[in-house]
Amino acid sequence: MSQKVIYYVYTNHKTGLDSLKKACALVQTFKDKSDYSVHLYVNDFRAGLVAREFGVSGATTIEGILDLDMVINRGDLLFIDSPEDDRGAMEEFVAQCKQVCKIAQDCDEVSRFGEIILPKKIVVDEIYFKDIASKVDRCVFFLSDSDHDKTIFNHKSFFQNLKMELILGHYFFVGYENSLKEFFNVIHEADEYQELIRTSASVVTSSVQTALEAKMSGAKVIFLEKEKLSNCDNTLLESINISIVYNFNLKQLENVINLNVSKIHTNIQ
């Protein structure tokens, strides 16, 4: 039986799809630069469908991390990006596989059974940096693929004068965009995400992965902290000069852009 790369990624409707986007970038790299047969496994069928938009088709849905024992074979390479409790199954994964690599979920995560812990780094699809796209003079806002708590609507006073264009998330509630129309100049569908991040001159986001993709694309990026960042995520963003605005502080945003907030869509600096 031929050796495989098994990449398992966990997503849910509350945390969004940052890990899926990272997974798709790595899966495509494996396919292009190795002789291994590469397989993407997800715990959410919807995530498998979204993966097609990011260049990876044929994702297989499983219940969760404990089902990996049914798909791995001796000699496989296993990558895991999941916060799930494996109930000690990691020890068996390490015994079965040629190598097990786990994407760190916490800054201080350590190996338990000999698996390699991969720290949080810049991992983006080469589409964002291989051929830098010409920029359209606009500022887009992408919160995340999920807004389960209706964060955007609950901060309407923050958004209503910013003249930004909103990119919807794949996990937004059906019809949610109707309550957001008055806060944004334009509302874009979720499947326009990649093209908009590649081509927009300025990007404001609460997604670490989106911030990295936009920065690699040559955009001017502001990270809007929705939840407290881990120290390693904070360090990662600051290391590539991404400004961070805390607690939806409009005054801080104005200071960051150093211009009249009404001109953010054309003049972010």
Image (cartoon, rainbow, N blue to C red):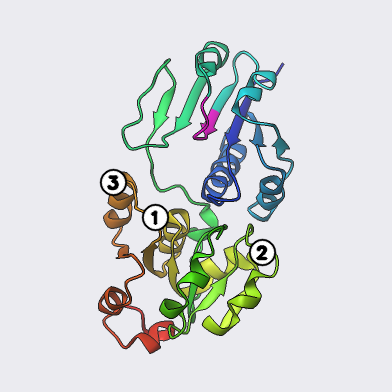
x then y, percent, for residue 30: 57, 37
State the CA–CA distance, disc 1 to disc 2. Answer: 25 Å
State the CA–CA distance, disc 1 to disc 3. Answer: 12 Å
x then y, percent, for residue 144: 52, 59
Q: Residues within 10 Å of mark 2 (few under 14, many from 20)?
A: some
x then y, percent, for residue 108: 31, 33
Q: Which mark is residue 121?
A: none
Q: Which mark is residue 231?
A: 3
Please state which of the two labelled residues, at mark 1 or mark 3, is closer to the viewer. 1
Which segment is the magenta one? 79-85
What quarter of the picture does the N terminus occupy? top right
Residue carrying label 1:
227
Residue carrying label 2:
191
Quadrant housing residue 147: bottom right
Specify the amino acid type for callout 2: Asp
73 vs 144, nearest the viewer = 144
- Residue pictured at 32% horizontal, 88% vertical: 260
